[in-house]
Image (cartoon, rainbow, N blue to C red):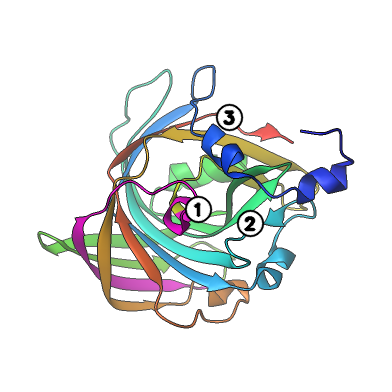
Amino acid sequence: MPNLPLAARSLTTPSLADRLALRERPGGAPLLRQEWGDLLFMHWPVPAALLQPYLPPRLQVDTYDGLAWLAVVPFRMSKVRTRVSPPVPGANEFLELNVRTYVHLDGVPGVWFLSLDATNALAVWVARTVFNLPYLRATMRLDSPGPELRQFNATRTHAGAPAAHFRATWKIGPPLPPAEPGSLAFFLTERYCLYASNRAQTKLYRGRVAHAPWPLRTAQVLHYESSLVEGHGLPTPTGAPLVHAGGPVGVELWPMRRV
């Protein structure tokens, strides 16, 4: 990258080559390994100016054809273990639900989480304490009333956090081909970095993630109700979301580094 001033580097929009480069597995040993499954991507296009105030000063909203994207993503996390320990019974599988958007810094694209709700108290504490991620306690349930049907219910229980609930039923359809580089599906799902900040948003951190390209399937949302987005002071998303079902996929995560 050219020797640009910090502000100019932060505004540099990632190229397709930048996005593809992040598919390369980082060096060194990952800190955590896990599997993500029964996942539903629900994405709504929104103006970038709507989300920019929710980001730390150096981060910029990542856009596709001029639009930002806001996502609500429920899924099952399993086989959670560190690089030095096997899965711990009772702590190696739980449900998660996040509200996220997409950002970039210095030409490096990634995910920014507005909130992450989870059922595992230990995972919430570790994520908040070690990774500076805005995890919150919640009760959740995932049911499979049919071979291709999923029902996900969640109620936030975290003390001091805005109340929120989520209910969705979706039907999983046929497999999709791998997301084509440069496509909208690739932009939304092929993300190999995550960003976080301290509570005062004076320190910024970036973590690497490695996994195979998402095995995506078509999906149809049969029922959806939620107050997660509104709990952040954002308007209710309008229109039908763009949806994909995903997983399972094995994931490796590296330690967060200050940037």
User: Could you say which is closer to the camera, residue 236 or residue 129?
Assistant: 236
Q: Secondary structure at mark 2?
A: loop
| Quadrant of the rendering where the C terminus is positioned | top right
The amino acid on which the numbered mark 2 sits, given as a three-letter code, is Asp
Report, in whole angstroms, how far the alpha carbon at label 2 lies from the one at label 3. Answer: 23 Å
Image location (x, y in percent) of residue 212 = 36, 35
Q: Secondary structure at mark 3?
A: loop
**Is residue 170 within the magenta segment?**
yes
Mark 3 = which residue? 255
Q: Secondary structure at mark 1?
A: helix
- Disc ID at residue 187: 1
Image location (x, y in percent) of residue 246 = 31, 52
Note whether residue 257 is visible: yes
Report, in whole angstroms, how far the alpha carbon at label 2 lies from the one at label 1. Answer: 9 Å
Report, in whole angstroms, how far the alpha carbon at label 3 lies from the one at label 1. Answer: 24 Å
Mark 2 = which residue? 62
Q: Image quarter for residue 193?
A: top right
First in residue order: circle 2 vs circle 1? 2
Residue drawn at (56%, 74%), measured in percent from left and top? 231
User: Could you say which is closer to the camera, residue 105 or residue 64?
Assistant: 64
Q: Dot 3: within a 10 Å radius of its alpha carbon, few (fewer than 14), some, or many (20 or more) residues? A: some
Tag in front: 3 or 1: 1
| Quadrant of the rendering where the N terminus is positioned | top right
Residue drawn at (50%, 27%), measured in percent from left and top? 24
The amino acid on which the numbered mark 1 sits, given as a three-letter code, is Phe
Tag in front: 2 or 3: 2
First in residue order: circle 3 vs circle 1? 1
